[in-house]
Amino acid sequence: NAGVTQTPKFQVLKTGQSMTLQCAQDMNHNSMYWYRQDPGMGLRLIYYSASEGTTDKGEVPNGYNVSRLNKREFSLRLESAAPSQTSVYFCASSEYPPRRGDSPLHFGNGTRLTVT
Amino acid sequence: GQQVMQIPQYQHVQEGEDFTTYCNSSTTLSNIQWYKQRPGGHPVFLIQLVKSGEVKKQKRLTFQFGEAKKNSSLHITATQTTDVGTYFCAGLGDYGQNFVFGPGTRLSVLP
C-alpha cells in the first residue's frame, strides 16, 4: 500500500515555463487536495476535488489548474510559472469530504518546486 | 474568511520538559484536527476533536477542544527527541468546506 504518491520530488523551472505535478492514491478515497506550504504560513489549499468528476478552488488558486483524471489521480498544472510559486506542494486525499465527518487527510511526500 | 492562529511559532525545550501549543480560530469550528510534520517530511494525522470541551489522550499527548469550540491545545508531557517536528492544527469552520491550517508550532527538543 503506497498511500499517496507524488511525482516529481524536486523540480526547478524558469519563469514562464509550465509543468504538471502528478498525484495518485491507492486507498480508494473520494476526495483529493493540493496544498502549498511556505515558511511560516502553514498549508494553504490550492484546489480540491470532493469526488471524482468535480473540482473547486481553494484559498490560493490563481496561477494553477487541476484535473481529476479518475478516482485515483489528481494533477496540478502550472501554466506559466512565477517565482512566487516557489514552494513545497503536497497532494492529499481523504475518504470523504471534510463535512462528512471523521476523515483524516493523508499526505504525499511533497514536491519541492523552485522557480527562478 | 476563517483564520487559524497558533502560538508559539517556535519552542525549544530540554528533553523531559513539557510542551504546549495553542490554536485559536476566528470563527467557531465544527471540528479540529492535529497533524505532525517531521523535518523534511509530510504532515501526518494525529487526532480529531469534535465535541465542546473534549479531551483526548494519546500516550504522552493530550489534546483539548475549547468549550466555545474556537480554540484547542496540544500538550506533550516529558518530551522526547522523537517529538521533534512541527505541529499543525486544522479547523473546519461551521460553514466551511475544507480545513484551514494554522501556521504551525515548530518544536525542538535538546537531549
Image (cartoon, rainbow, N blue to C red):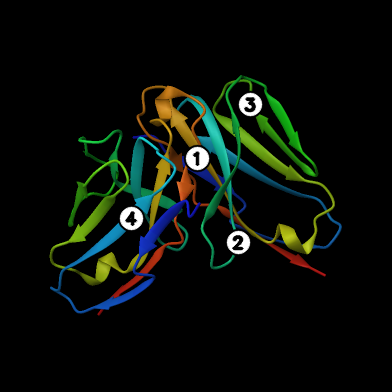
Q: Would you name the residue on which mark 1 appears?
A: B90
CA–CA distance between discs 2 and 4?
A: 21 Å
Tell me which amino acid carries mark 4. Cys
Q: Which mark is residue B40?
A: none
Label located before the other in sequence (1 or 3): 3
Label located before the other in sequence (2 or 1): 2
Q: Quadrant of residue B50?
A: top right
Protein chain holding label 2: B
Q: Position of residue A25 (x, y in %)?
A: 39, 49
Q: Would you name the residue on which mark 3 appears?
A: B66
**Which sits in the foreground, B18 or A114?**
A114
The answer to whether tags 1 and 4 share a subunit is: no
Q: Comparing marks 3 and 4, which lies closer to the viewer? A: 4
Protein chain holding label 3: B
Counting other residues with Cα less than 10 Å from the Cα at mark 1, is it few (<14), some (14-19), or many (20 or more)?
A: many
Q: Comparing marks 1 and 3, which lies closer to the viewer? A: 1
Tell me which amino acid carries mark 2. Arg
Q: Is residue A102 in view?
A: yes
Q: Would you name the residue on which mark 2 appears?
A: B38
**Mark 3 secondary-structure assignment:** loop
Tell me which amino acid carries mark 1. Ala
